[in-house]
Amino acid sequence: MPTLFVLSHAPGADPGEAHKLTFARDGDAVILTEDAVFGAGAAETSLTGALAAADDRGIDVFALAPDLAARGIETSLETVDYAGFVELLTQYDRAVH
Amino acid sequence: MPTLFVLSHAPGADPGEAHKLTFARDGDAVILTEDAVFGAGAAETSLTGALAAADDRGIDVFALAPDLAARGIETSLETVDYAGFVELLTQYDRAVH
Amino acid sequence: MKTVLFMIRTAPHGSAAIPESHRACLGFATMPFEVNYLLTEEAVWALQPGQRAEAIGGHDARALVGELGDLDVSLYAEAEALEARGIDSDAVAPIQPLSADEIADLIAGADAVLTY
Amino acid sequence: MKTVLFMIRTAPHGSAAIPESHRACLGFATMPFEVNYLLTEEAVWALQPGQRAEAIGGHDARALVGELGDLDVSLYAEAEALEARGIDSDAVAPIQPLSADEIADLIAGADAVLTY
Amino acid sequence: MRFLFVVRAGPYAFQHTQTVVELTRAALDAGHEVSLFMAEDAVVVMNAECRTGDNPNFTEALRELSDQGVEIQGCGACCLFRGQSRSDLAEGMKMAGVASLAKMAGDADRVLTFGY
Amino acid sequence: MRFLFVVRAGPYAFQHTQTVVELTRAALDAGHEVSLFMAEDAVVVMNAECRTGDNPNFTEALRELSDQGVEIQGCGACCLFRGQSRSDLAEGMKMAGVASLAKMAGDADRVLTFGY
């Protein structure tokens, strides 16, 4: 019964985004959207550690491509467009934003 | 030309409130209002260190009494009501919220 | 019967998160849903005793949350958040403190999660 | 002549902080004001190069900020915030990076501070 | 599959409404059904008179989605608090209570909230 | 002394409007003058039709403050974005541009912004 965690706040503005990941489990996934994609680039943010730990625990991490493009952020994460985001919503049993 | 710094966000939700105090100087003051008064009580929050440091640097720290009362928070800080808040606004040359 | 989880992480009074989630919760409580209501992070301040919300024209958040319990809504709070704020978890009954792992279970058991 | 300081600390695109402060700034720039515009914390992401804001129907925040410079608005950014995000402060000219102490000076010189 | 997106943040102060419009379009393109519930500051997007000049007009975007079968309801109390009555709403948008929100959530396979 | 309070957050989603109403009352009581400028989601409070039931009605509170000489203006573009035209506004409340905001700030001895 895996869950998709949706993040949308800038990592430096909202420590709750990293905190949310403490509720994620193996097989769950995370998608960075809107200002949360500032945590998808090369810069060290309050999400960096939490995302690395999530990855180690078998939690897939995605980032929303149009939000990355709008902000000029390049990422090594797997990216999806809106259609891919919808697809993720169907693949996971529920979403927590 | 002292400044009154006005905080209103819950300390655990907004690291920017503590960050704002890095721009405060001797003779400036801080007032905790709305959800920022959760940083005025006995609980250790992200504001605790910044407020102690501010106090050491000669920065007065106030808390808004009606916001404390509404939230059930007791404080050892100096409290003011809305009239006192207005008075502080007149005493400092500008306010930064 | 579907299970809905309300997850509130916003502090009371500074925003409408508590009264709005309370109101939405009433809608679910009158329908065939199992309703869980969980306070995390700054939202656990809703359980602080001694709120005199009339000082700002508001509602006692602890009373609003308590009301939900009378409607068969199961009430939970993040234990770590309570402890960090010095809110006595014994004093918040019938609200049940949960570990991060128990919160993960609660999420995994929900058909829908509404966040505030 | 009065001095107004716009202090923006909110990230671009997720909210209207940059376009709204830009618009308000235009109002001050047409009046007898000395106008300073300072980006701090997550707002320095407004200076990130390569924004393709049309992907979300928005405006290039870097271009909006740059426009203000053409109207004699003095542009500043928090040096520490730029550095923490790996934004090259040489590449943001004519925006001037400021230390915390220089920001305190800028605040102390303002008649009014508008925050976003 | 049927999705329910719940939006609480204002359409022109925060990005959430733009994200929801794009997600809804993508979901329809993939053959899914979508319902939208607007609450708190998000309800102003239901106003038929929204004028956004050269900027994206989310009321028009929602009108088009409504024509494509998207069910759009908004919290009636939230509308009244903001001075909107039934006659102010654009075609295809309805005022509803929290019981309708619960019903829409019960009918949906996936629920996603866009708060503040 | 003359104060200008600028509000951007929605009146019923965040506490800022309540704080501003109380500050304004206290300032008048102390013999000061106050101007208010509403922007973004805050402009809905200027709507004459706001219906809040048993809850505080900030439109009425502002109407009373207006009767006591408080100047209340709101960002016209923000009103239009939210479906409000001049005829929707309560007595004593005016739509204005950013130049008016600048003029009000120039006339004020103290400015305080209430953003998000």
Image (cartoon, coloured by chain):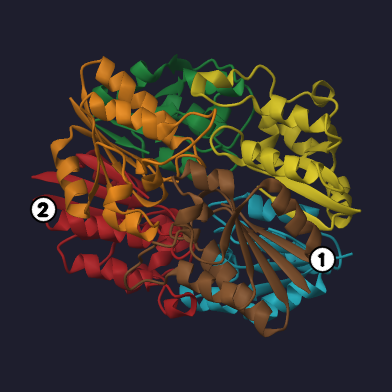
Chain colours: A green, B cyan, C red, D yellow, E orange, F brown
- Provide residue B39's location: percent of width, then percent of height: 59, 65
Q: Check the image and report above or below for F80 versus A55.
A: below
Type of amino acid at the residue the image marks with label 2 = Met
Residue at x 59% of width, y 68% of height: F20
Residue for badge 2: C31
Separation (CA) of disc 1 from disc 2: 54 Å
Name the residue nearer the viewer: B35 or D95. D95
Q: What mark, if any, has residue C109 been given in the picture?
A: none
Residue for badge 1: B28
Residue under mark 1: which chain is it in? B
Residue at x 54% of width, y 15% of height: A76
Q: Check the image and report above or below for A33 versus F85.
A: above
Q: Check the image and report above or below for F60 versus B19.
A: below
Name the residue nearer the viewer: D71 or E2. D71
Residue at x 66% of width, y 80% of height: F28
Q: Alpha-carbon neighbours of circle 1 within 10 Å: few (<14), some, or many (≥20)?
A: many
**How many numbered marks appear?**
2
- Provide residue B97's location: percent of width, then percent of height: 68, 58
- Provide residue D58's location: percent of width, then percent of height: 55, 26
Co-location on one chain, circles 1 and 2: no
The mark closer to the camera, 1 or 2, is: 2
